[in-house]
Image: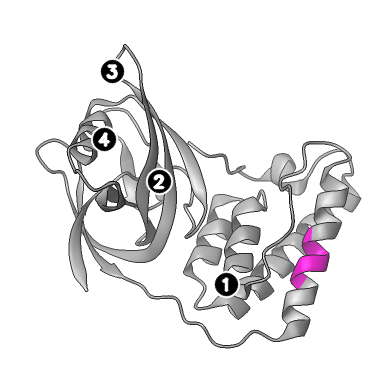
Amino acid sequence: MTETLPMFPLNSVLFPGLSVPLHVFEDRYRALVHHLLRIEDPAARVFGSVAIREGYEVGDHGAQSLFRIGCKAQLTEIESHDDGSFDVVAVGLERIKLDRLDRGDLFPLGHVTEQPEQTPPVDEDVLERARSTFTAYRMALTEIRTDPYTGTLPRDPTYLSWTLAACAPLPLQDRQALLEADDATDRLVLVTDLLRSELKAMNVIPSLPATEVARTRWSPN
């Protein structure tokens, strides 16, 4: 199904089921928030987000190139400030493909197509390897910085795959590849391989994760 959504490109990747805090201060995105606030049903306060391949979230030139696969998001928390800016929290819903982006009169508008998640069964060995690798990565990381995750990992394979993708401090290109994976099995195999590569790099340069040594770190907007 094709639909038109307000669009908020980000310098990070938003995943289904996971939340992201956003500080909104540029005019076009403040207008987007005002537009959503005028919608009475909070569940209908949705927009689209895709990661920026080249360029920036703000400024006159802005994003020069965007990834096409992104995520629909729902505005769930809103705090307004005297200077007109907002601090908001959005939670990722289903994946979308950006077919066309229009500048719009007040804020960008995207013509998007839903990208449903495939849900074939996931082999238990794949689940166990993913969990154990992420646990080892957390243990190695907490020796030098904050644990990227607290609590018990989800049991549902699809939500587990999204959680590991969101929590692993990987470069933007890797995170985008995780978002675009066809199903939970492909995503779990990929995130396991990526985390194992990070662990190997950390063993070579034990003072810092590989993402801080030679890659662009992900950080929520």
N-terminal of the pair, mark 4 or mark 2, is 4
Q: Which residue is mark 3?
A: 84
Alpha carbons under labels 1 and 3: distance apart: 38 Å
N-terminal of the pair, mark 2 or mark 1, is 2
Q: Which residue is mark 1?
A: 158
Q: Amino acid at mark 1?
A: Thr
Alpha carbons under labels 3 and 4: distance apart: 11 Å
Range shown magenta? 130-134
Q: Secondary structure at mark 3?
A: loop
Instruction: Check whether the beta carbons of the residues at disc 2 and disc 3 lie within 8 A of each other.
Output: no
- Foreground: 47 or 27? 47
- What residue do we see at 49% from left, 43% from top? 20
- Foreground: 18 or 167? 18
Is residue 27 among the parts visible in the rendering?
yes
N-terminal of the pair, mark 2 or mark 3, is 2
Q: Secondary structure at mark 2?
A: strand
